[in-house]
Image: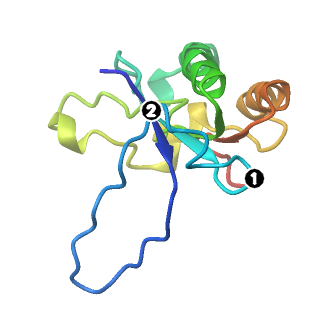
């Protein structure tokens, strides 16, 4: 399921021990007079997940891993462009938005995750010179927005 949600941040959220968090109000087309650009910014949150399953660890060749990430980058670009076209100045993508969690048949789906450095090794990238960082840096400059991208970074 794909969703693009645009929010206007209109206040601070105070966290209190044992207090329930209240969601902010979704605003898709706020009145400009109520939210002047010099005081408020539009934030887009992209809810997206790779629809296939991916192979963990040694089963994943570098070419396979790059093809998964390339597909995700292109799909996220579509949503990021849509958000920017709707006025978003900050776009946030999901954790591992450029990747996905692996499909480990012996585990129930809710527990599928990378469990060791060897399992995630084919998917990690250097920041800022890795292909994902380079791709989204160019996109952010072009669209004049800020991006938060979820990827697996190499531990140097």
Q: Disc 1 or 2, which lies upstream in sequence?
A: 2
**Foreground residue among 59 and 83:** 83
> How many tags in the picture?
2
The way the protein has been coloured in the rendering is: rainbow
Q: Residue at x 38, y 49 (%)?
A: 115
Percent coordinates x, y for residue 14 in the rendering:
41, 78
Q: Quadrant of the N terminus?
A: top left
Q: CA distance from mark 1 to mark 2?
A: 19 Å
Percent coordinates x, y for residue 47 in the rendering:
40, 32
39 with respect to 102 (left or right): right
Percent coordinates x, y for residue 147 in the rendering:
68, 40
Residue carrying label 1: 38
Circles 1, 2 touching at the beta carbon (< 8 Å): no
Residue carrying label 2: 28
Residue 35 visible in rendering: yes
Q: Mark 2: few, some, or many residues within 10 Å (few <14, many ≥20)?
A: some
Q: What secondary structure is found at the residue carrying circle 2? A: loop
**Foreground residue among 143 and 28:** 28
Percent coordinates x, y for residue 12 in the rendering:
49, 70
Q: What secondary structure is found at the residue carrying circle 1? A: loop
Q: Residue furthest front?
A: 33
Q: Mark 1: few, some, or many residues within 10 Å (few <14, many ≥20)?
A: few
**Foreground residue among 127 and 8:** 8
Residue 150 visible in rendering: no
Q: Residue at x 53, y 17 (%)?
A: 68
154 with respect to 109 (left or right): right
Instruction: Please identify the quarter of the rendering in which residue 55 is found.
Output: top left
Q: Which mark is residue 71?
A: none
């Amino acid at each position: 399921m794909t969703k693009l949600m645009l929010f206007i941040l209109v206040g601070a959220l105070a966290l209190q021990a044992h207090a329930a968090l209240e969601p902010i109000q979704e605003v898709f087309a706020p009145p400009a007079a109520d939210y002047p650009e010099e005081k408020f910014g539009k934030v887009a949150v992209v809810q997206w997940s790779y629809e296939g399953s991916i192979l963990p660890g040694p089963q994943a060749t570098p070419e396979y891993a790059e093809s998964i990430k390339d597909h995700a980058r292109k799909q996220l670009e579509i949503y990021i462009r849509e958000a920017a076209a709707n006025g978003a100045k900050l776009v946030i993508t999901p954790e591992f938005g450029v990747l996905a969690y692996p499909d480990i048949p012996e585990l129930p789906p809710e527990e599928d995750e990378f469990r060791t450095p060897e399992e995630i090794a084919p998917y990690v990238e250097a920041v800022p010179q890795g292909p994902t960082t380079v791709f989204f840096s160019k996109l952010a400059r072009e669209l004049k927005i800020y991006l938060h991208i979820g990827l697996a970074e190499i531990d140097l």
